[in-house]
């Protein structure tokens, strides 16, 4: 699991400490792809409404795998 976290950290996928609401996954994804944290959260909720399914599971997995920002 440390290899995955190291790889995520190198790619810029980290959970920031300052813009978290629940776990920081959406804020981290938004920062990595150049979007604001609220835009990413809105896209996540819209995706849940359009395609209900495993997004919550993916969020939880990313919560576990994405390292915290230093």
Image: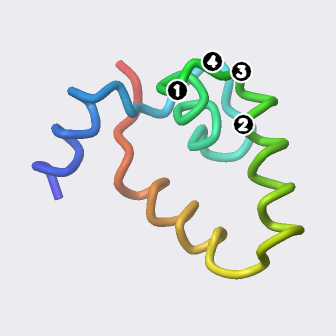
33 relative to 6, above or below: above
At mark 3, the secondary structure is: loop
Q: CA distance from mark 3 to mark 1?
A: 9 Å
Which of the two discs, 1 and 4, labels the residue nearer the N terminus? 4
Q: Residues within 10 Å of mark 4 (few under 14, many from 20)?
A: few
Which of the two discs, 2 and 4, labels the residue nearer the N terminus? 4
Q: Residues within 10 Å of mark 3 (few under 14, many from 20)?
A: some
Say if mark 1 contacts mark 2, CB within 8 Å: yes
- The residue at 71%/21% (across/down) is 36
Q: CA distance from mark 4 to mark 3?
A: 13 Å
x and y, in percent, of residue 19 in the image: 68, 23
**Quadrant showing the N terminus:** bottom left
* Residue that numbered label 1 is attached to: 33
Q: CA distance from mark 2 to mark 4?
A: 16 Å
* Residue that numbered label 4 is attached to: 18
> Residue 65's image quarter?
bottom left
x and y, in percent, of residue 4 in the image: 19, 51
Which of the two discs, 1 and 2, labels the residue nearer the N terminus? 1
* Residue that numbered label 2 is attached to: 40
Q: Residues within 10 Å of mark 2 (few under 14, many from 20)?
A: many
- The residue at 70%/81% (across/down) is 53
x and y, in percent, of residue 57 in the image: 57, 74
């Amino acid at each position: 699991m440390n290899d995955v976290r190291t790889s995520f950290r190198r790619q810029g996928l980290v959970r920031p400490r300052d813009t978290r609401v629940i776990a920081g996954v959406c804020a981290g994804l938004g920062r990595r792809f150049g979007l604001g944290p609220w835009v990413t959260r809105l896209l996540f909720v819209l995706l849940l409404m359009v395609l209900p399914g495993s997004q919550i599971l993916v969020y939880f997995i990313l919560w576990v795998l994405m390292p915290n920002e230093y």
